[in-house]
Image (cartoon, rainbow, N blue to C red):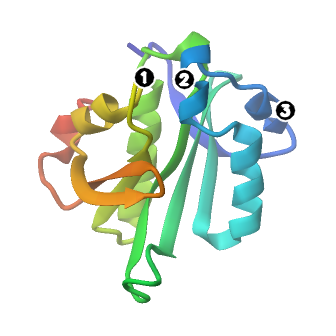
Amino acid sequence: MIDSTPRLVPVTPENVDALCALRTHPHQEHLVSPVVKSLAEAYAHGATAWPRAVVDGDEVVGFVMAFLDIVWNPAVDPEGRRSGLWRLTISADHQGKGYGRFAVRGVLDELRRRGTTKAYVTFHPGEGTPEPFYLGLGFRLTDELSGDQRVAVLDLDDGDLDRDLDLD
């Protein structure tokens, strides 16, 4: 799929315009916030956001952002903290090439490095949902909703994780 060596890099003055210009397929636009909103949220949430550009060669092909150690539902469990995948946008021109899997793997590797044992993701249900993508990576649905989004979890201690992601 990917013939070169993609990498995740911090957001910088040099790549922010390319990130803000990223567009998904028109039928996916209702499923993910624009990158500019994600960058504003990353700024507002400071240490709990981990935004990265997905770069291949000199080209920005996507954006991924993790959430780190946030209180998930303070009304139910004020001490319950979670980390996971907050946003993923791969340019319409680069979808289906493995960049999404690469970006998710990068987030999971970072979460593991930080000692996280479970990764969470939320997504909108309905037509064009990324649910099959996340379930195909090994995430499993929970009974929870986050607003109108479904919640899925992945056990990072699972020895089969690298095989399931089919990246090695």
Q: Is residue 64 positioned above or below 156 on the image?
A: above
Q: Position of residue 44 (x, y in %)?
A: 75, 66
SS class, disc 1? loop
Q: Could you tell which of marks 2 and 1 lies nearer the N-terminus? A: 2
SS class, disc 2? helix
Q: Is residue 155 visible?
A: no
Gap between marks 2 and 1 measured at Cα? 6 Å
Task: State which quarter of the image contains the C terminus.
Answer: top left
Residue labelled with disc 2: 28
Q: Position of residue 1 (x, y in %)?
A: 38, 13
Q: Residue at x 58, y 30 (%)?
A: 30
Q: Which mark is residue 153?
A: none
Left or right, 159 with respect to 14, comes to left
- 6 and 116: which is toward the camera: 116
SS class, disc 3? helix
Which is more foreground, mark 2 or mark 3?
A: 2
Q: Is residue 120 positioned above or below 5 on the image?
A: below
Q: Could you tell which of marks 1 and 3 lies nearer the N-terminus? A: 3
- 155 and 59: which is toward the camera: 155
Residue labelled with disc 1: 128
Q: Residue at x 33, y 34 (%)?
A: 131
Q: Residues within 10 Å of mark 2 (few under 14, many from 20)?
A: some
Q: Residue at x 44, y 88 (%)?
A: 78
Q: Quadrant of residue 127?
A: top left
Residue labelled with disc 3: 17
Q: Residue at x 69, y 48 (%)?
A: 38
Amino acid at the residue labelled 1: Gly
